[in-house]
């Protein structure tokens, strides 16, 4: 059984359900967390799982199940998300093409949910989309791996990427983004903003490091 996270009232993701896996088991996450200057060096999920023991166990089980085998239609349909918006990987990232393909099957099974995918592992997702197609009910958000540096979208991936999300430290953010130039993820509730979950809104979305 895949664990679905229901985010608490008063948080940025209030009212949204997400499916995630453990950064502790993901070899890509482990490697990136040791890169100086990277967003992953300041990984909040790694710290969060240190004191939310029950969640840590659930996400470890998710990682194992999602990477064990390709889900059947019935297995994907058994993962039921009841919120209007759903998020893939609110605490980590995909590790394998199989995991991404299982997420695709879950999103297709929950066709009445608007999904947002956040990932730095673009190649894994593009490989999965080539095999199974990109669900019509999702947006793909490429997360810039480096702090203060907007990720470039390669030609081979442009048809799949709906937004690029970049985190900036306070100094750089204040220098670059002022007034009307700001397209900010400002800690507003995602259910209120919804920019990342819609196609055709601002392509580049920026957030100040908190």
Image: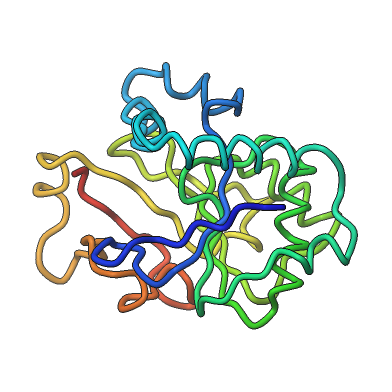
Decide which of 86, 7 is in the foreground and name it.
7
The number of numbered discs placed on residues in the rendered structure image is 0
Decide which of 34, 92 is in the foreground and name it.
92
Residue 165 at x, y percent in the picture: 39, 53
Residue 103 at x, y percent in the picture: 70, 56
Relative horizontal placement of residue 31, taking residue 41 as reference (left or right) = right
Residue 33 at x, y percent in the picture: 43, 23
* Quarter-of-image position of residue 146: top left
Task: Residue at 60%, 26% (x, y): give it.
Answer: 25
Residue 66 at x, y percent in the picture: 74, 44
Vertical placement of 190 versus 156: above or below? Answer: below
Relative horizontal placement of residue 160, taking residue 190 as reference (left or right) = right
* Quarter-of-image position of residue 184: bottom left
Vertical placement of 167 versus 60: above or below? Answer: below
Q: Quadrant of the C terminus?
A: top left
Task: Residue at 23%, 65% (x, y): give it.
Answer: 10
Task: Residue at 39%, 75% (x, y): give it.
Answer: 194
* Quarter-of-image position of residue 172: top left
User: What's the image's color scheme?
Assistant: rainbow
């Amino acid at each position: 059984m895949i664990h679905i996270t229901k985010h608490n009232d008063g948080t940025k993701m209030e009212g949204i359900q997400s499916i995630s896996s453990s950064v502790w088991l993901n070899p890509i996450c482990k490697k990136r967390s040791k890169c100086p200057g990277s967003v992953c060096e300041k990984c909040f999920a790694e710290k969060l799982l240190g004191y939310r023991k029950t969640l840590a166990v659930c996400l470890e089980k998710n990682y194992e199940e999602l990477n064990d085998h390709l889900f059947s239609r019935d297995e994907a349909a058994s993962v039921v998300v009841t919120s209007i918006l759903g998020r893939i990987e609110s605490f980590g990232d995909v590790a394998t093409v199989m995991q991404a393909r299982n997420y695709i099957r879950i999103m297709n099974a929950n066709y009445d949910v608007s999904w947002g995918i956040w990932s730095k592992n673009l190649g894994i997702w593009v490989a999965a989309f080539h095999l199974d197609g990109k669900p019509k009910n999702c947006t793909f958000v490429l997360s810039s791996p480096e702090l203060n540096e907007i990720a470039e979208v390669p030609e081979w991936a442009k048809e799949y990427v709906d937004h690029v999300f970049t985190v900036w430290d306070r100094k750089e953010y204040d220098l670059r983004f002022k007034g009307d130039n700001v397209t900010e993820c400002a800690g507003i509730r995602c259910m209120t903003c919804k920019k990342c979950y819609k196609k055709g809104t601002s392509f580049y979305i920026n957030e100040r490091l908190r």
